Structure formats: structure tokens, C-alpha cells
Image (spheres, helix red, strand yellow):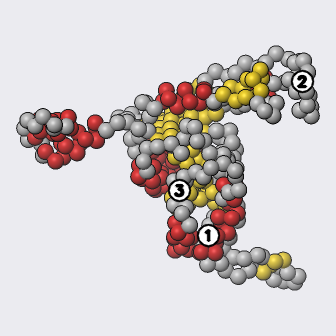
Amino acid sequence: MPKNQSTAAQSARRASRSGEKYTEALRRATISNMPHVPHVLRFLAERSGNHYQVVGGIAAAWAHSGQRVLLLEEAEDYWRWTMSGVFDRRGRGRRKKETEPATPPEPTTSTLWASPDGPGLLTRHTCMWEVRHPSRESDRGLPRTDRSPLTAAVADALDAYDVIVLLPRYWSYPDRESATAHVVLGEIDIFPHTDCRTALPGLRGEDKGVPLSPEQSAAVLRERCLGFLFGSPHPPIHLDGVLWQSNGTLPVDEDYLAGVDRDMNRAGLRPLGWAISERWPSPHRELPEPDRLKDLSFVQRYQPIAGRLRTALDARPARRN
């Protein structure tokens, strides 16, 4: 046997002696010997309240396909209770605390869905992401922030999961410290398929406006729904794609949306799919109930988007932004 032959090749050769095809055994052994590098995904959105259903649906679709998925959620910020009495109402000067600091909440872990006969798993872990130190002030007189709890939570989960989805309290800022990929969730209240509508007197009531081309519609969507990404003093960030969520029925057909996607791709924003928001009776800022995550009709709704998103994540090098 050649001295420099890889471990995968040795395993494949042993399998071939038992009758298995050498090329198939080599491919399987190579994949199994690859280092496990999970994706740490951070969704970006101007408003997060209506996005928990689509994120939960994507995570459930991944779990049902055999992946181990962790939803790492930031706990409610207790800092404002901890810092009660440190600053006066105008933020100037210090005064004696009136109450004792609040106790940080304990981390909680729950299994949302687990495959009865496979590796598929969807877990939710909620914990504090940061610690603020009143005794160590920044240049502006505010407590310094220590994000070591989030770093530790991600590190503890790396070997146990294939995808880690970060769910912060606020979604509009990228997470360069922990995330390896960022995907934008664009929320559409009114789809821009016509120009300005004007209220008119008489029986007509309203002028519907001149229809927009898919390219024009794409330009309006970028300005209207992705404006929060621009104008920031922070360094540029690599975006791995854009998911669109409409808060109502889309007034255009699939061909029109394909034209919008082509223009988004031309502008460097990789389109990953379109979803319709369940605004009612979906709760605000809450993940789907476990019973919904078991419902195949709910999961299948998000499988195409989840598949395209996973392909985009697997295609990028395993690096941090």
C-alpha cells in the first residue's frame, strides 16, 4: 500500500475487498473524514416581529431533512433592571441605586422536534448573550459590554449541530463576532408593482397607477426594504442572499417575480425565495408551536426556501465575516 495514501483511500480499499465499489466507498469515506464545520447563521431584518414563523419553518425543514439545528435565542434584556438607579433620568451623573440588581435568567433548553428514526433535531436554547459592567465605563460613560456568554454558547454547540441560527433581540445589526453567514429578510407590506396611486373624486375612487417593470419593482424593493443595510459606518459585510416575506398576497405572477430575482442577482443580492407571512393568528415575535413544527404541511411550505438557503451556505467558504 502506498505510504502517502490517505485514510479515506485506505478505508475505500478495505471496503472494495468486500465487494463495494471503490469510487463510492472513497466518496463516502472522504465526506465522513471531513472536519465538522457547522454554519452559524444570522438573519438581518429591519423589523423582526413577523419573521419568527418563516425562520422557524426553515429550521424545521432542515431538521426534517436530517440536519441537527439549534435556535440560539437571546434572553430578554434584564440590564435595564440591573442598572436601575445608576444614572439619573437624563443620563447625567450617578446616584445611589434604589434597588438591588436583578438576577440574570438561567439558560433554558428545549427540544422542539426530533426525528423518531434519524438524526434530524431542532433545539431551542435561550440564554443571556452579554454581560454589562457598571464599574468599567466606556468613553461615553456607559457600561462596557462583554459578549463572552454568546461566544461560549456558540462554542459549546459547534460539535453537536449542523446549523446554528442566531436569534437576537434586535435583527438589524450584523454579528461579526459569532456569525459565519448573514442572510437578509426583506419584509414587504405593499408590493411595488405600480407607481404612485392617487385618490380621485367621483365613482373611480382611485387611480391604480402605471405598472412597473420587474426591474423597476426590484429597485423600489431595494430602496424601501433594504435601506437599513446602507449608510452604516461599519465595514462592509458579505451577504449570502435575500429572502422576501410579503405581509399579503402577492399581486404578480411567478414570471414577474423571476424578473425581480434576476435584477436582484444582477445587483449582487442573491435571491433565495418568497414567502407569505402568517400575520394572523401568528403570535408576534414567537417561534411556531411544537405541534406546527411536526405538521408536514407546514414544514413542506418552507422546504424549497430551506433547500436553496442551505445550498448557498454550503457553497461559501467556512469563514467569519
Viewer-closest of 282 and 69? 69
Q: Residue at x 54, y 41 (%)?
A: 179
The mark tally for this picture is 3
Q: Which mark is residue 162?
A: none
**Does the residue at mark 2 contact the one at mark 1 (Cβ under 8 Å)?**
no
Badge 2 density bin: few <14, some 14–19, many ≥20, Cα 10 Å: few
Q: x and y percent of residue 185 in the render?
A: 61, 53
Q: Earlier in the sequence, mark 3 or mark 2?
A: 2
Q: x and y percent of residue 83 in the render?
A: 81, 24
Answer left or right for 248 relative to 159. right
Identity of the amino acid at label 1? Ala
Badge 3 density bin: few <14, some 14–19, many ≥20, Cα 10 Å: many
Disc 3 to disc 2, C-alpha distance = 45 Å
Q: Work out whether 10 lies above or below 184.
A: above
Q: Residue at x 69, y 64 (%)?
A: 223
Residue tagged by mark 2?
94
Identity of the amino acid at label 3? Gly
Q: Work out whether 259 lies above or below 10.
A: below
Badge 1 density bin: few <14, some 14–19, many ≥20, Cα 10 Å: many
Q: Residue at x 68, y 22 (%)?
A: 105
Residue occupying the far top of the picture: 100
Residue tagged by mark 1?
218
Viewer-closest of 320 and 255? 320
At mark 3, the secondary structure is loop
Residue 296 visible in the current orientation: no
Residue tagged by mark 3?
241
